[in-house]
Amino acid sequence: MARHRILILCTGNSARSQMAEGWLRLLAPERFEVFSAGSEPSTVNPLAIAAMSQRGVDISGQRSKHLDEFVESEFDYVVTVCDRAAEACPTFLGPARRLHWSFVDPAAASGTEAEMAEAFATVRDEIEARLRAWLASET
C-alpha cells in the first residue's frame, strides 16, 4: 500500500511543525511520508530538539524548509499547526485535504530556561495527543 504524503506547516518551521513531523514519522511510518515547512523558515529550535529527545524522538537531523520547496508537490494532507501558517498556506496540487490544528508557539514563551523548556514539553505532548487521536480516527 502506498503511503500518504503529508505536509505540516508552521510559520518558522522551527518547533511545532518539526515536532509534528518527528511524531508522525515515529507513530505511522508505514502510513505516511512526512514533510514540514514554513512560510518564514529559520532553524530547528534547540528546545524543540531537547523536548522531543526527552520522549525518545530524534529530530536533530531535520532542517527548516521554506514552503516554496513544496508548492509544486502533491500531498494527500496539508496540516497547519499555527494560525499565521493557515492564513499564508498556498494551494497545493492534487487532492490535498487541509487540516488546521492551532498550537501555542512555545518559542514565544519567556521566563527561566526551565519555564521555556516546560512550554516546549507542553506543546510536544499536545501535538502527540492530537496526532494519536487523528491517526485513530483515520484508520
Image: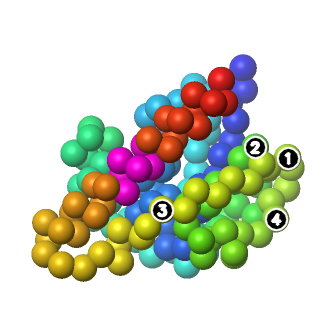
- Residue 17, given in percent of the width and then of the height, sits at 50, 58
Question: Residue 47 sits in which quadrant?
Answer: bottom left
Residue 139 among those drawn in magenta: no
How far apart are labels 2 and 3 at the CA level?
A: 22 Å
Q: Residue at x 48, y 62 (%)?
A: 103
Q: Which residue is mark 3?
A: 103
Q: Residue at x 74, y 54 (%)?
A: 98
Q: Which residue is mark 4?
A: 91
The mark nearer the N terminus, 2 or 3, is: 2
Q: Amino acid at mark 1?
A: Pro
Q: Which residue is mark 2?
A: 76
Question: Residue 10 sits in which quadrant?
Answer: bottom right
How far apart are labels 3 and 4 at the CA level?
A: 22 Å
Q: Given this view, does label 1 or label 3 mark the residue nearer the observer?
A: 3
- Determine contact: label 4, label 1, CB under 8 Å: no
Q: Amino acid at mark 4?
A: Thr
SS for callout 1:
loop
Q: Main secondary structure of the magenta part?
A: helix
- Determine contact: label 3, label 4, CB under 8 Å: no
Q: Residue at x 86, y 49 (%)?
A: 94
Q: Amino acid at mark 2?
A: Asp
Q: Which residue is mark 1?
A: 95
The mark nearer the N terminus, 4 or 2, is: 2
